[in-house]
Structures are given as structure tokens and as C-alpha cells.
Image: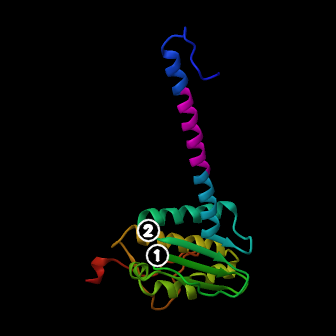
Amino acid sequence: MPFSVRRDAPPWEGLLRTLGVIFVFMGVIWLFWKHNQRTIEMLDTRQVVMDQTGALTEEQKDSVVDLSRALRASFGLELRLLIATDALATPALDAKTIYIALNPEQEQVLVVLPPIVERALGYGFTAYLRHEHFMPYWESGNWQRGLGEALGMIWDTLSSPGAARFEPRDSGEQFGNDGSYRGPVQTEDQKE
């Protein structure tokens, strides 16, 4: 028998064989756990970014997935992004999901924010994204950059509470040369 200990063997040989078997089982369990974790991450990636157009690069998708993980870890929020070729429809969502859908061909934007995120970002933020933010990006054909900046604005505002909130702008062109928004931002101190 391969695992039996000979009678004339030193006493520590049985202990070493037992420890070896235990380490093999622990290694197999660890590899199984890592495989399952990787599978869950791959499935999660498919749920976060749905790109029907194929216009986003893998690097851009990875950035969105990283943001989704950061939102989940920091705020308990989910992020869903849809780049569609069809008409946009509002799906049934829970109170913890940020949903952004774009249709580049028809230049449509749909943004659904949970009520708590809407309050944190400012009540005009959703309308701004739908009607104003993407306009220069649609014109230049670089809507991917506009998407990245919109997601960046969401993260920056949520991760620094009290620093700045979006307020609807009055009038006038307030886009910088790079297409980024430079409109009025109101801090909590300025409100009082």
C-alpha cells in the first residue's frame, strides 16, 4: 500500500505522509475556489456591460467593470451599462442600481438613478446627462469619451460627499475645449 507506513520506518514518516495528503487536498480546494471566483467575475462582467454594437474596447469594458466593483464595494450600488442598437427601454430595477443605456446610432441616452444617488448627484444631473452632456460627443463621434466622463462625474461626486453637487446650468456654453463639462457646481457651504 502506498500510504501505509512500514513497521521499521521512522515515526515521523507517517506524519509527513499525512501532512502531504492534507496539503494536496488544501491545494485542490484553493484552486477550485479561485476557479469559481474567476467564473463569477466573468459572469459579472457580462452583466455590467452589454455592448450590442461592439464599439467599446476591452480596456473600456474593463474600466466600467472596475468602476462597478468600486461602486459596489464603497456604496453598495450596482452599475449596469447598455450600448444598444435598438430603441431604449427602462428595465425593472431595484433601488441600488445605476442604469445607463446609450444608442449611438439614434443619439439616445437613458439614465436611471436610485433616489439616494439622485439626491447625492443633484436633481438636474439625470436631465443633464440625457439632454446636454453627450451632445458634443455625438457631434464629434467620440461618445465613448463622453460615457467615460459621465461615469467619472458620478464617481467623483459620490466619492467626495459634500464637496460638490451638480446644479442645472442657466444658459451659455460651458463646455471646455476638451468637451468636459465646466458648469456651475455648488458646494454644501455655498448652499447655506
Circle 1 packing at 10 Å, graded few (<14), some (14-19), many (20+), is some
Q: What residue sits right under mark 2 in the picture? A: 76
Magenta part, dominant SS = helix
Amino acid bearing label 2: Gly
Q: What residue sits right under mark 1 in the picture? A: 96
Asked whether the residues under the numbered discs 1 and 2 touch, taking CB atoms below 8 Å apart as contact, a structural biologist would say yes
Q: Measuring 68% from the left and 61% from the top, which residue is drawn there?
A: 58
Colour convention: rainbow
Is 161 located above or below residue 41 in the figure? below
Q: Quadrant of the N terminus?
A: top right
What span is colored magenta in the figure? Answer: 20-35
In the image as oriented, which residue stretches furthest toward the left?
A: 192
Q: Measuring 65% from the left and 66% from the top, which residue is drawn there?
A: 46
Q: From mark 1 to mark 2, how far is it between C-alphas?
A: 7 Å
Q: Where is residue 99 drawn, in percent x and y?
A: 55, 78
Q: Is residue 25 magenta?
A: yes
Residue 159 visible in the shown view? yes
Q: Measuring 58% from the left and 76% from the top, which residue is drawn there?
A: 179
Q: What element carries label 2?
A: loop
Q: Where is residue 185 drawn, in percent x and y?
A: 40, 79
Amino acid bearing label 1: Lys
Nearest the eye: 23 or 176: 23
Nearest the eye: 44 or 172: 44
